[in-house]
Amino acid sequence: MTWIELSLDTTAEAVDWVCTLLPEVKYTNDIKIVKYTESAANPEVQWAFTIHLYLADDFHTIACREIEQVLSPLQRTGLVGALRLTAPVETIAASPLMHRIGQRFVVLSPDLSSSDVAANEITIKLKTSLAFGSGLHPATIAILQLLERHIVPEMNVLDLGSGSGILSVAMAKLGAQVLALDNDIVAVQSTQDAVERNQVEAQVTVREGSLGTGSEFGHWMGGDTINNVPTIQATGTFDLVVANILARIHMALAPDYHQALRCAGLLIIAGFTADVEEAVAQSLIEVGFEAIDCTRLNEWVALAYRRKG
């Protein structure tokens, strides 16, 4: 089969948004993300990565129009560059990527071996997918840094909005037992793939669903409306709830977070910037949380709270 290659440059903040917003058109799910090189330099923008997608030649004209339309908001705000069309290719080459996060985590593309990873480092192998959580977004990096500090072996953890599965795998490799939930079937499949790829099936259960009232909000990332999402009731069974999702969802779910946690349980959240931090914090304090830790990367914030007795 002949493929048409498309590419575009992105900031670190936009990588996961691009993967999430790409419509369901006739391109391969195995997109490539590579570090940006100066060969396509734009002096006005500091790009971080280049994303490559491959379209079936028979459908590429229609697919290009759909992709340009869905990515236009990111282009207008300067988060991604123009879509570039290159020559047809017969095969799709692999794109090895190694990315270190925090003190111990190393995110690897599936085609890379672990030979260059130190004995005390924790590897997370991820297949590039159309689910949020590549490990390249500042919010993901910030929340992983908090998890390094707060995960204790045998913790019972809820990963709400599991996306690519990166957080579920990281917590399992730190010794936790994890329930991974997402309301998007693509994310559920991506999480399950990550769990199996990293051989943590005994520690991670993956399900389609949401916590409490979360099932009422449809697709959190702005995709098509999702109906009949299974609900997990908040019944005080978790030692830790982790969620890397939108600020408005955190605020709406604050009472559910509180009810889902045991006394003195922890909540670790990210997915928003400093401009809404105060509003998110206030919604958590009002239902009985106290702040204990945070990490910041550029304008992105990850917060840790404890449920008061």
Image (spheres, helix red, strand yellow):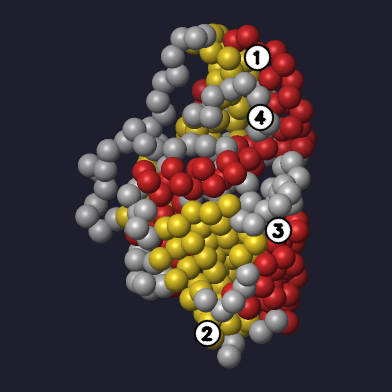
Could you give the CA–CA distance between mark 1 and mark 4, rounded to whole angstroms? 13 Å
Identify the residue at image location x=53%, y=29%.
29
Task: Name the quadrant of the C terminus.
Answer: bottom right
Viewed as shown, does residue 124 lie left or right of 179? left
Q: Is residue 293 visible to us here?
A: no
Q: Quadrant of residue 294?
A: bottom right
Please tell me the numbered disc located at residue 264.
2
- The amino acid at mark 2 is Ala
- Residue under numbered circle 4: 24
N-term-proximal mark, 1 vs 4: 4
Q: Earlier in the sequence, mark 2 or mark 3?
A: 3
Q: Residues within 10 Å of mark 2 (few under 14, many from 20)?
A: some
Quarter occupied by residue 301: bottom right
The percent coordinates of residue 71 (x first, y second) are 72, 33
Q: Which mark is residue 275?
A: none
- Three-letter code, disc 4: Glu
